[in-house]
Image (tube, rainbow, N blue to C red):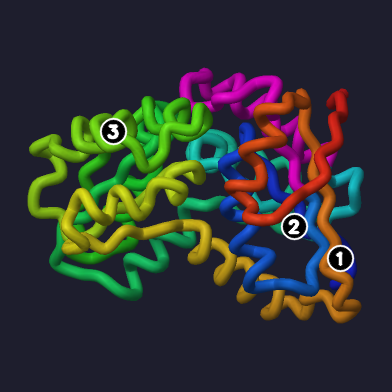
Amino acid sequence: MDLNPEQAIGIFDSGVGGLTVAHAIRQILPDEKLIYFGDTAHLPYGDKSKDTIIRYSKEISNFLLEKSCKTIVIACNSASATAYEDLKKDFEGRLLILNVIDPVVNYLKNNFEDTKVGVIGTKATINSGAYEKGILSECRNITPVSMATPLFVPMIEEGFIFDDISNAIIRSYLSSPMLKDISSLILACTHYPIIKNQINKFFAFNVEIIDSAKIVAAELKDMLQSRDLLSRSGKGESEFYLSDYTEHFAKIAKTFFEEKISLRKVSLK
């Protein structure tokens, strides 16, 4: 694998949610060039079939490969759960690939035991069983319980945050008996950090809310550092591409990345 430190970090998601991961990477790796792709023409991935998600993920990965990325971060839990193995098979010899699930499993393995951990995410992520399989395989004495919370994504994207509507939806989901006595809760969707404070408040701050974005960014840094692939130029540029541009996306993108960004529409082959 012939890679060099000044190649970009590629990041993709079905839409805007992955910008929380991009922001975390920017915070911990300010010198790196980032290339982000949001597949807004096909969002959300959470209710798509496995074959469809794999197809979209391969098309985006080819785009990022053409952009000379040294690594691809699958900043979408649905794509991480369903397409990661296929992408590894097709692309790993040409660049590094990181999903957003394995770093969280490693975090649990190193920090928890004898506990019950909740997982909330889209239908595709939860139905894949990826988190449960990873936790049961790698983590001693951790009991995972998973629940789909599909209304959270449209709620967040429509701007229902810190209001009665969002609080009612959060309360309706998180009151489930499935989540009783959990010690921590994995936010298995990159949209969910936007409502992290509300979720924390629901649990009266007695449950550790695990935000995968920071964990993934830290693991990415370790991955690049161990291979001597950290940028030395210090440019820290960013490029943001979409498969479909809308004013609404442009408006909410700033909320997720926490900076004003310039968005470009491109058509994939």
* Badge nearest the viewer, 2 or 1: 2
Tell me, yes or no, whether the two marked residues, 3 and 1, touch with CB atoms within 8 Å.
no
Q: How many neighbours does mark 3 have within 10 angstroms: few (below 14), some (14-19), or many (20 or more)?
A: few
State the separation of the CA atoms marked 2 and 1: 9 Å
From the viewer's perspective, tell me whether residue 8 is left or right of residue 164.
right
Mark 2 or mark 1: whose residue is earlier in sequence? 1
In x, y percent, where is residue 56? 69, 27
From what the image shows, is residue 96 above or below residue 74? below
Q: Which residue is mark 1?
A: 3
From what the image shows, is residue 153 above or below residue 118? above
Q: Can residue 1 be seen at all in this image of the molecule?
A: no
Furthest residue in direction front, as rendered: 163
Q: Which residue is mark 3?
A: 164
From the viewer's perspective, tell me whether residue 3 is left or right of residue 147.
right
In x, y percent, where is residue 30? 74, 72
At x 70%, y 21%, the residue is 41
| The C terminus sits in image quarter | top right
Q: Secondary structure at mark 3?
A: helix
| Amino acid of disc 1 | Leu
Q: Which residue is mark 2?
A: 71
At x 87%, y 63%, the residue is 7
| Amino acid of disc 3 | Asp
Please state which of residues 1 and 162 is positioned toward the viewer in this rendering.
162
Magenta span: 36-63
From what the image shows, is residue 226 above or below residue 60? below
Q: Can residue 249 be seen at all in this image of the molecule?
A: yes
At x 33%, y 68%, the residue is 109
